[in-house]
Image: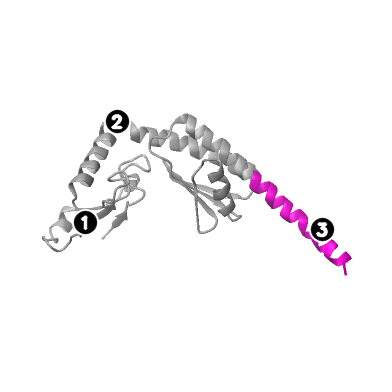
Amino acid sequence: MLIADEIQCGLGRTGRYFAYQKFSSKPDIALVAKPLAAGLPLGAILTSEAVAARVSPGVHGTTFGGGPLICATALEFLKIVDETKVLANIRERGAEMRQGLEALAKKFDFVREVRGEGLILGVELSINGASLVTSALQRGLLINCTHDFTIRLLPTFLISKAEVRSFLKIFEALLTEAKEASSFAEGAGPHAQHAHAATR
């Protein structure tokens, strides 16, 4: 049985309804949640006919599931995705972001990898990324760092071309600061040791 966890990458994040659509195999079960009700708490389990036939009423349930307000929000979200060009925007802006990030990776040797698709992107660093998160917030840019070295980028589905350019400009400034700080720390090492020895 194949299960696809689409909680974060599903419902448009990669520029497709589901990330698994990139591959030839279809899952027996797909889990969706975060974008489904535009941030309100709602999740769903999608299954094949074969799996659904084995689930009877009462076997699966949730305490707060099916609230009318949240379900109405979910229906509106799905309608917007279906009737507008939001998926195309995700693909186009995501490609621009990735292209820009890959250009920056060639400029800064501590950027080890750029990965992802659409508007779910990761920038793997060889330095700790916590300081970048703090500096970004001071500039009005909200990013996240996971596992100490991975900058995680999940911009809004409605991000514009101008906002992508603005992000890349700010991100380059953050990387430049990080490079300068790293160079200063490396350069300070021998001098600090020499000064320490001179005081003995």
What is the tally of numbered marks visible in this picture? Answer: 3
- Tell me the kind of residue under disc 1: Phe
Quadrant in the picture for the N terminus: bottom left
Q: Which of marks 3 and 1 is nearer the N terminus?
A: 1
Q: Where is residue 109 in the image (x, y as percent from the top left)?
A: 64, 48
Please determine whether, in this image, residue 98 is positioned above or below residue 161: below
For label 3, the crowd category at 10 Å Cα-Cα, with few meaning under 14, some 14 to 19 and many 20 or more, is: few
Quadrant in the picture for the C terminus: bottom right
Residue placed at 50% from the left, 59% from the top?
Answer: 147
Please tell me whether mark 3 sits on a helix, a strand or a loop.
Answer: helix
The image quadrant of residue 92 is top left
From this viewpoint, which residue is outermost toward the bottom? 200
- Tell me the kind of residue under disc 3: His
| Residue that label 2 marks | 84
Q: Earlier in the sequence, mark 2 or mark 3?
A: 2
> Is there a contact, CB below 8 Å, between mark 3 and mark 1?
no
Q: Where is residue 51 in the image (x, y as percent from the top left)?
A: 18, 58
The image quadrant of residue 87 is top left
Q: Can you see residue 129?
A: no
Please determine whether, in this image, residue 100 is positioned above or below residue 8: above
For label 2, the crowd category at 10 Å Cα-Cα, with few meaning under 14, some 14 to 19 and many 20 or more, is: few
Q: Earlier in the sequence, mark 1 or mark 2?
A: 1
- Tell me the kind of residue under disc 2: Thr
Distance (Cα) linking label 1 and label 2: 30 Å
| Residue that label 3 marks | 191
Chain part drawn in magenta? 177-200
Residue 88 falls inside the magenta stretch: no
**Badge number at residue 64:** 1
Q: Position of residue 25 (x, y in %)?
A: 29, 51
Foreground: disc 3 or disc 1: 1
Residue 183 falls inside the magenta stretch: yes
